[in-house]
Amino acid sequence: MNNPSAYLLESAGKNVNSVGVEDHDFSKDDAGSCIILKADSLDEAAKIASSAPIIKNGGEICVQPCGEMKLWALVADAALASAGLL
């Protein structure tokens, strides 16, 4: 199904758990649910994820870049900066 409102997740990401953060290829994994957040980098997003309570309880979080969202965020920041609002 081609959904123009959907944001494709990139396959290269990070797996965050109580042991730490490691690189992970998600090309064969399916996302169960997701939260979209804006971060300056994949490492920053993984750092934010590592503070989630589920990590302390033995869970894990998969952090993946969202290509269209990254592009949108960069464009939005440029527009805000040029308007003197950032």
Image (cartoon, rainbow, N blue to C red):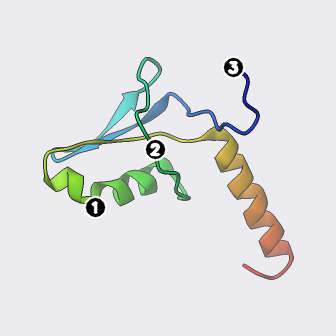
Q: Mark 3, residues whose alpha carbon is within 10 Å: few (<14), some, or many (≥20)?
A: few
Q: Amino acid at mark 1?
A: Ser
Q: Residue at x 78, y 57 (%)?
A: 75
Q: Dividing the picture into quarters, in which one does residue 3 lie?
A: top right
Q: Amino acid at mark 2?
A: Cys
In the rendered image of this protein, does residue 1 appear above or below residue 22?
above
Please tell me whether mark 2 sits on a helix, a strand or a loop.
loop
What residue does disc 3 label? 1
Q: Mark 1, residues whose alpha carbon is within 10 Å: few (<14), some, or many (≥20)?
A: few
Position in image of residue 80 (x %, y %): 79, 72
Q: What is the number of the mark on residue 34?
A: 2
In the rendered image of this protein, does residue 24 appear above or below residue 67?
above
Q: Dividing the picture into quarters, in which one does residue 56 lie?
A: bottom left
Q: Quadrant of the N terminus?
A: top right
Q: Amino acid at mark 3?
A: Met
What residue does disc 1 label? 51
Relative to 46, 18 lies left or right: left
Say whether disc 3 or disc 2 marks the residue closer to the N-terminus.
3
Q: Nearer the viewer, residue 24 or 55?
A: 55
Say whether disc 1 or disc 2 marks the residue closer to the N-terminus.
2
Q: Residue at x 72, y 39 (%)?
A: 5
Relative to 32, 85 lies left or right: right
